[in-house]
Image (cartoon, rainbow, N blue to C red):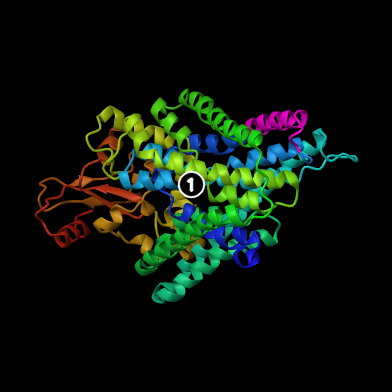
Amino acid sequence: MLRKVTFDPEVFFNILLPPIIFYAGYSLKRRHFFRNLGSILAYAFLGTAISCFVIGSIMYGCVTLMKVTGQLAGDFYFTDCLLFGAIVSATDPVTVLAIFHELQVDVELYALLFGESVLNDAVAIVLSSSIVAYQPAGDNSHTFDVTAMFKSIGIFLGIFSGSFAMGAATGVVTALVTKFTKLREFQLLETGLFFLMSWSTFLLAEAWGFTGVVAVLFCGITQAHYTYNNLSTESQHRTKQLFELLNFLAENFIFSYMGLTLFTFQNHVFNPTFVVGAFIAIFLGRAANIYPLSLLLNLGRRSKIGSNFQHMMMFAGLRGAMAFALAIRDTATYARQMMFSTTLLIVFFTVWVFGGGTTAMLSCLHIRVGVDSDQEHLGVPENERRTTKAESAWLFRIWYNFDHNYLKPLLTHSGPPLTTTLPACCGPIARCLTSPQAYETIFMNQEQLKDDDSDLILNDGDISLTYGDSTVNTESATSSAPRRFMGNNSEEALDRELGFGDHELVIRGTRLVLPMDDSEPALNLLDNTRHSPA
């Protein structure tokens, strides 16, 4: 009977986790994600490693105590404790983020927590694989060996970078296919190819010895950044709804199976000392991740991570589907069975108690709710606007200029034509790779304006409208003087051109601010702007 309600744990990694992780990357709010990318990377990489070693060290102390008191019925090594630390360091605040989304919590907090959880899952997967691959020389495979440690670090870096490259490469290939073919005319085929190419990322990464789940994550981010702009409007809606549905079904199935496993798993090992030690360890590990790193990050941030944000991030460190999937992969030994049983209890407790207390904690910490991410800059003083723009771009200004001037025009119909950004000697290649749409001024409707998938981060490259020797001039029927947008890098030009008012229109990759009369039909506005003198 039990065999009918259980199945191979690898199904989680091969079938259920890929759509969850892909949707996390595909639905990423990149504008706020990249604005806080330095902090997110610190929490996800350095913070997860700190949490893993803190939890592993505390659990090794618990295991030693259990040996002394005679509570341990099998072998339990330090590497097992580190593996447990990597497993329960995988945060999955799906409940908290759902509440954040409904209440429209402060976008900076949402970006920090969501971005950390997305990359944290990828780091935890590769970190656990590296710990399992730790093999010292000699007969005793559980002693400390410097060579084996550096080998494990090399495995971690190799697997993560290889998975990243595989996912990004698949996304780039899909972008090129959708750009240079007429798939837009066959929406069902376009959606199907998009789905299959995304899923094949997982299979290719696993075939090459990398981690498929990590590759799928970066494939989703690349698809959202490039391929999404090439899809037809119908396929854009279809792909978002499709992966949202798959994510919803997979998440609910995993949580349902968790409850079933609690009663059907035949080799549970519950030890009170280990369970209590595990709960203490995860809280201390989370605290060692959030508070020291926030202190260091605030030294270099203009927009500080407040103490209420830090407390909320500490509180929101729920464990969920990823921790369960990592724990159930291997339950062959006594140590792994104890780790799996304890992980189940941790997941249930954090989801029920912390997830259920999210609203009360937001109120207690006085964190803003009802914040519209598209209107967050309205009413902000001029000096704060300038600070926000400078801070959002300084670290990645080189990357964004390169992306805006070369990658976006190459992989999508957005950005300036390659004929104006590449050297003159590359003229024939540039004309071949530049789509006709790149020469046209395309205005999006108000619904597209609110979609962050067509809006990234504000920097000089995004607002420059001077392509070659031509300059865009816009004039409204209700305005007596035309406004010219020149390729000016001065601070005054940036403040003038980057308006935070209600009347913003978006060209793919470029932001325009036009004087607009609300009573004038949109069609007349488009006609005026298209026929304005150069």
Q: Is residue 132 left or right of residue 9?
A: right
Position of residue 325 measured from the top left corner of the image (x, y, whole percent): 60, 52
Position of residue 135 measured from the top left corner of the image (x, y, whole percent): 81, 43
Range of residues picked out in magenta: 53-72
In the displayed structure, would residue 274 be above or below residue 193?
A: above
Position of residue 298 measured from the top left corner of the image (x, y, whole percent): 46, 25
Type of amino acid under label 1: Phe
> Which residue corresponds to the image point at 32% horizontal and 30% vertical from the top-left?
366
> Which residue corresponds to the image point at 48% horizontal and 52% vertical from the top-left?
24
Residue that numbered label 1 is attached to: 402
**Residue in front for this viewpoint, 283 or 150:** 283
State the image quarter where residue 59 is shown.
Answer: top right
In the displayed structure, would residue 223 be above or below residue 300?
A: below
Q: Is residue 321 visible?
A: yes
State the image quarter where residue 107 is shown.
Answer: top left
Q: Is residue 474 left or right of residue 420?
A: left
